[in-house]
């Protein structure tokens, strides 16, 4: 059921991503201070926003799991968090490259968004170790959900604390959209939408693959039982 | 709920009084860490932001040490099954644990903070005891609330000790940011300055959010 509509969605995602990057390079004006290195902004920031959104979505699915007891929601939450982790790695790497290009250092402690992102990333790195060190699958789903909800609530709180701790010497990335020229803003918003589409597409692919694997396993199990039954029933 | 929490809290405190597992270990760890900081930083005395950092890093790690032991009696002795069989609200178990752990932290700090003043703190920093108590109280609530939740989360896993620290450190970073920023002016070299109110606010907000959150989700950790 997750395979339905995957092909048009993939096509739309490809078009949107290509369009967003084409706009970023050929339509949006070159940044006066930073030059070409500012173009990483159209990858880095959408990736960060979508990753955080994915973490929050994982938390919401977990709430649904704990409320209904439906393990399907736990699977959705797991896939959402897993994909967000991958995007988070990308965010940290592109952020580091951008920091090097514009401030001359690979890591800048007074960039609040980057620092709080690192903390969130470190916390979510514990998701798999926690999850897979519990053997009972039912308990595993429950504990992972509790973690996902806690971490999801931690995200905004952490951003608040880290942002307050800075002296605002550098432009804040999430706040810079207010002062963007219209052409840059358009390219940026389209890039965010394209990145979100990419996330949803990958999420659906992963869900489809997990469902297919589960169905295959249950069919195999059923088949194995059938063979066992016919063997024992045949007279020897 | 009230009487249940009372009874469970009495049980926790009696257990700690009898086997003396958490508090002495946390205390010894704190004082040893101060000595380690003395040699690691190569300073005879610290003040300002450095002093606040030394104090709070030590408190955080000591708290992680204590949180590791928090559910040991329940899991190793099988006492959790007994608790779950009792017709009580599961949230009461969390509330009692968090209160007991908060009590442990206060007990440790009653000795560890004077030891910090004695061993490491520079001459200018001893004036603002009341402010420090306020920050300690707010931070202790946050640490107790979050560390108890983390301990409950990690207790049924294979790598319990590892996960408590791995989960607890990033989760408690806002507390450390708030507490360290709030204490730094108290330890300033030229005498104590006033605490910026926003850091007390951050600590209070953290306590509130994680208190409510833990209250809401802890039930699910005990549902077997």
Image (tube, rainbow, N blue to C red):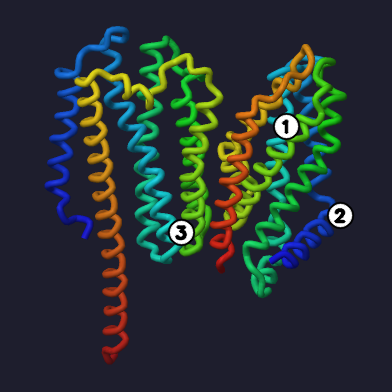
Residue placed at 28% from the left, 54% from the top? A207
**SS for dot 1:** helix
Discs 3, 2: same chain: no
Tell me which residue sits at (67%, 27%) in the image: B182
Q: In the rendered structure, the residue with mark 3 lies on which chain?
A: A
Q: Position of residue B146 (x, y in %)?
A: 62, 46
Q: Nearer the viewer, residue B100 or A129?
A: B100
> In whole angstroms, how far apart are the C-alphas of marks 2 and 1?
24 Å
Of residue A195 and residue A174, the one placed in the foreground of this image is: A174
Query: Which chain is indicated by disc 2?
Result: B
B202 displayed left or right of B103? left
Neighbourhood count class around disc 3 (C-alpha, 10 Å): few under 14, some 14–19, many 20 upward: many
Quadrant of the snapshot with the C terminus of chain A: bottom left
Q: Position of residue A187 (x, y in %)?
A: 21, 25
Q: CA distance from mark 3 to mark 2?
A: 36 Å
Which callout, 2 or 1, points at the residue further toward the start of the chain?
2
Question: Label 1 is found on which chain of the structure?
Answer: B
Report the residue marked by disc 3: A141
What element does badge 3 sit on?
Answer: helix
Q: Are marks 3 and 1 on the same chain?
A: no
Label at residue B58 = 1
Q: Which element type, helix, strand or loop, lies under badge 2?
A: helix
Q: Nearer the viewer, residue A121 or A211?
A: A121
**How many angstroms separate mark 3 from mark 1 (CA)?**
34 Å
Q: Could you tell me residue B141's position as x and y percent? A: 69, 44
In this rendering, position of residue A107 left or right of residue B130: left
- The image shows residue B127, relative to residue B89, as above or below, that is above
For the residues bearing labels 2 and 1, Cβ distance under 8 angstroms: no
The residue pinned by badge 2 equals B17
Q: Can residue B158 be seen in this snapshot?
A: no
Q: The N terminus of chain A appears in which quarter of the rendering?
A: bottom left
* Residues packed near mark 2 inside 10 Å, few (<14), some (14 to 19) or many (20 plus): few
């Amino acid at each position: 059921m997750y395979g339905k509509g995957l092909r048009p969605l993939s096509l739309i995602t490809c078009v949107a991503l290509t369009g967003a990057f084409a706009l970023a390079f050929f339509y949006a004006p070159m940044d006066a201070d930073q030059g070409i290195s500012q173009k990483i902004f159209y990858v880095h920031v959408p990736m960060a926003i979508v990753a955080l959104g994915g973490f929050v979505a994982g938390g919401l699915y977990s709430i649904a799991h704990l409320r209904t007891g439906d393990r399907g929601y736990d699977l959705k939450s797991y896939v959402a968090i897993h994909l967000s982790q991958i995007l988070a790695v990308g965010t940290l790497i592109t952020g580091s490259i951008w920091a090097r290009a514009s401030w001359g250092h690979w890591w800048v402690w007074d960039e609040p968004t980057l620092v709080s992102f690192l903390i969130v990333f470190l916390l979510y790195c514990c998701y798999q170790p926690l999850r897979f060190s519990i053997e009972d699958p039912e308990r595993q789903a429950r504990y992972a959900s509790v973690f996902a909800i806690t971490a999801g609530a931690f995200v905004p709180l952490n951003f608040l604390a880290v942002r307050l701790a800075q002296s605002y010497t550098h432009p804040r990335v999430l706040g810079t959209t207010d002062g963007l020229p219209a052409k840059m803003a358009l390219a940026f918003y389209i890039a965010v939408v394209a990145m979100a589409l990419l996330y949803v597409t990958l999420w659906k692919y992963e869900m489809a693959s997990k469902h297919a694997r589960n169905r295959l396993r249950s069919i195999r199990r059923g088949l194995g039982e059938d063979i066992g039954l016919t063997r024992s029933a045949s007279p020897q | 709920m009230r009487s249940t929490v009372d009874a469970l809290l009495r049980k926790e405190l009696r257990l700690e009084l009898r086997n003396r597992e958490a508090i002495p270990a946390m205390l010894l760890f704190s004082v040893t860490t101060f000595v380690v900081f003395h040699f690691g930083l190569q300073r005879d005395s610290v003040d300002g932001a450095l002093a606040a950092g030394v104090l709070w890093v030590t408190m955080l790690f000591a708290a992680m040490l204590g949180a590791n032991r928090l559910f040991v009696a329940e899991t190793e002795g099988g006492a959790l099954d007994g608790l779950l069989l009792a017709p009580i609200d599961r949230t009461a178990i969390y509330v009692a644990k968090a209160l007991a752990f908060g009590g442990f932290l206060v007990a440790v700090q009653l000795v560890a903070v004077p030891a910090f003043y004695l061993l490491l703190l520079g001459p200018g920093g001893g004036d603002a005891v009341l402010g420090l108590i306020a920050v300690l109280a707010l931070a202790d609530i946050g640490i107790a609330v979050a560390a108890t939740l983390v301990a409950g989360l990690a207790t049924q896993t294979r790598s319990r000790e590892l996960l408590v620290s791995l989960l607890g450190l990033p989760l408690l970073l806002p507390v450390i940011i708030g507490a360290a920023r709030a204490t730094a002016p108290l330890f300033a070299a030229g005498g104590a300055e006033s605490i910026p109110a926003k850091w007390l606010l951050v600590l209070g907000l953290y306590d509130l959010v994680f208190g409510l959150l833990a209250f809401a989700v802890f039930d699910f950790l005990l549902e077997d």
